[in-house]
Image (spheres, coloured by chain):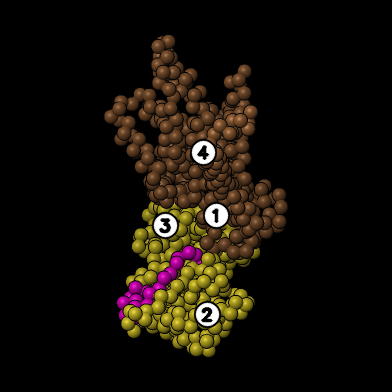
Chain colours: A brown, B yellow
Amino acid sequence: MHASASTAVPSAERTAEAARNAKDTRDDRIFGWVLKGCALIVLLALVGAAGSTLWLGSDAFRTFGFGFLTSATWDPSNDQYGALVPVMGTVGTAFIALLFAVPVSFGIALFLTEIAPQWLRGPVSSAIELLAGIPSIIYGMWGLFIFAPFVAEHIKPWLMNNFSADPPDGKVSFLVQHVPGIGKFFSSEYPFFGAGVFTAGLVLAVMIIPFISSVMREVFQTVPTRLKESAYALGSSTWEVVWDIVVPYTRTAVIGGIFLGLGRALGETMAVAFVLGNTFKFSLSFLETGSSIASTIANQFGEAQGLQRSALMALAFLLFVVTFIVLLIARLMLRRLKTREGK
Amino acid sequence: MGAAQATDITGAGSSFVYPVLSKWSATYAESTGNKLNYQSVGSGAGIAQIKEGTIDFGASDAPMSGEDLTKFGLGQFPVVVGGIVPIVNLQGVAAGQLKLDGKVLADIYLGKIARWSDPAIAALNPGVKIPDVKVTVVHRSDGSGTSFNFTNYLSKVSPEWASKVKFGTAVEWPAGVGGKGNEGVSQYVRQIPGSIGYVEYAYAKKNSIAYTQLQNATGAYVQPTAETFAAAAATADWKSAKDFNVIMTNAPGANAWPITATTWVIMYKKAKNASHTKVAFDFFKWSLEKGQSQAASLDYVALPDTLVKQIEAYWGSDFK
């Protein structure tokens, strides 16, 4: 069969086709390798950065061992370092940032894709993109000079009066008397001072809203119109369409967008350094001052030498670890959501 | 010297000295064409870079130890003097009105004095009406020469501070909150009634923040001014120190401001790059001899003449 088929085709044509096929295969292979290389660069860069911080921080890890993670001491003049307060500050500020940014971004994105009149979409979208372009130091200075004093004057006293066991007005609220432990999360040594974990979280929320909302807006637009129209035709309200059609259809991408914002919140440096209060005292309270990994590094790296420098590098490595763990939890959550849908 | 032969020299380090260095270099470049490229990256980074030999000079707010200088073949000399002042936010208390001594200041920063009505403060300030509010301590959150000199002073006047907290560009502060940079500290102090912080004098003066008087080593109360900074620079024990390794805090002069600081310039004793080093020395010679008025306009104090002579002698004897 083969032989007869091949004799039917003139040999010149045959070799040309074979050469073309070989070239195609080769080109495809090269293209594949190039793409693989591009993808690997990311991995290499990440492993390289994590590896070099681990290497440079190894002195601190060796000196303090596991205690580096559990100690709340940060004492450069006695060369004693622990990462507990910065790690908690990083996670705490990012948590507060998400708490405020996710619902607001969700609202913005839905408004823009489902409800806003056409003429309003352009200006609001550009405003959000502008918000994303502002450098973090500007947010930091805005936080320091305007927002922190505002929090100190209007928000913090109210929160403390209602939720703290040690309110500035001296009257412990009904809520605090009946919910044990809540006072711990809302206490503060400085009731009339705005900087702290809560304020930093809010500033971060403003910073990450543009990231999350623009991703959400993009993916909400990918929901096929006929799906939504079918639902409307069946008598759904806008809310039902959003909740039962748009959100399930885009869930993975929405969570991806949230994580883009979370990544920025975890690693934000200058803005946080200005409004966090930069103290190394262990506290569970959101209204207390604290420090974050990134702000600690930014604050102390320029003057640090020896073991202090190594401890800062070790902190940098921990930031990789914290980010990795947070991402891992998100993946697991996503998987659980999917399996539940499967049932 | 024409522009064609101009040599650009590079330096890095202390941010404290940056404003005056850039002013000096601008004026110097006008007359010689030689430009200075100074990176204000922090004293620690300045020391690291001069050790690696990537710059012509480093600048640090803390002197290098004699041991390190010998090991790397480096020498150092002071270039300009400035003051660090406690600032307070107390209703009805004006700038320069409140008196503090070293022990009280240390106890405040140790967290032992928690209210402004404390008898120790009242005893120093008869007749001054101080509001009875909580003391909130503000310190620098970033590693800095300002913190180095401030904590060095507290170590000299308080044994408890010296044993517990010690001194350095960053320490474990027993109390209070940390602001980033001079602007962070002064902004926190403005925001918190009853707070106390410390900043460079130029910063407090420019922003009209209420600073305090301090008791100096001789027991006299002094105001932070150019004269009291100069008095500290003149009475510090430069003569017996090798490589000018003297931290000027708590200087013994009758009129000396107790938290006076300087910045050291660090260079190779045996030049790595002869032509650059020559220009650098020429620049510093010009700054020390002719740069006083520019320093004064930025609220720094020029070094006293005797000290300048000593530095020039040191150049002659120690540098090749």
In this picture, residue B27 sits left or right of residue B241: left
Q: Which residues are magenta?
A: B24-43
Same chain for the residues under marks 2 and 1 in the image: no
The chain holding disc 2 is B
Same chain for the residues under marks 3 and 1 in the image: no
Give the spatial CA distance, label 3 vs label 1.
Answer: 19 Å
Same chain for the residues under marks 1 and 4 in the image: yes
Which one is closest to the eye, mark 1 or mark 4? 4
Picture disc at residue A297: 1
Q: Which residue is mark 3?
A: B183
Q: Earlier in the sequence, mark 2 or mark 3?
A: 3
Secondary structure of residue under mark 1 = helix
**Three-letter amino acid code at the position of disc 4:** Glu
Give the spatial CA distance, label 4 vs label 2.
Answer: 72 Å
Q: Earlier in the sequence, mark 1 or mark 4?
A: 4
Residue at (56%, 44%) from the top-left corner? A26
**Three-letter amino acid code at the position of disc 1:** Ile
Neighbor class of circle 2 (other Cα within 10 Å; few <14, some 14-19, many 20+) is some
Instruction: Note whether A248 is above or below B24 in the view shown.
Output: above
Q: Which residue is mark 4?
A: A13
Say if mark 1 contacts mark 4, CB within 8 Å. Answer: no
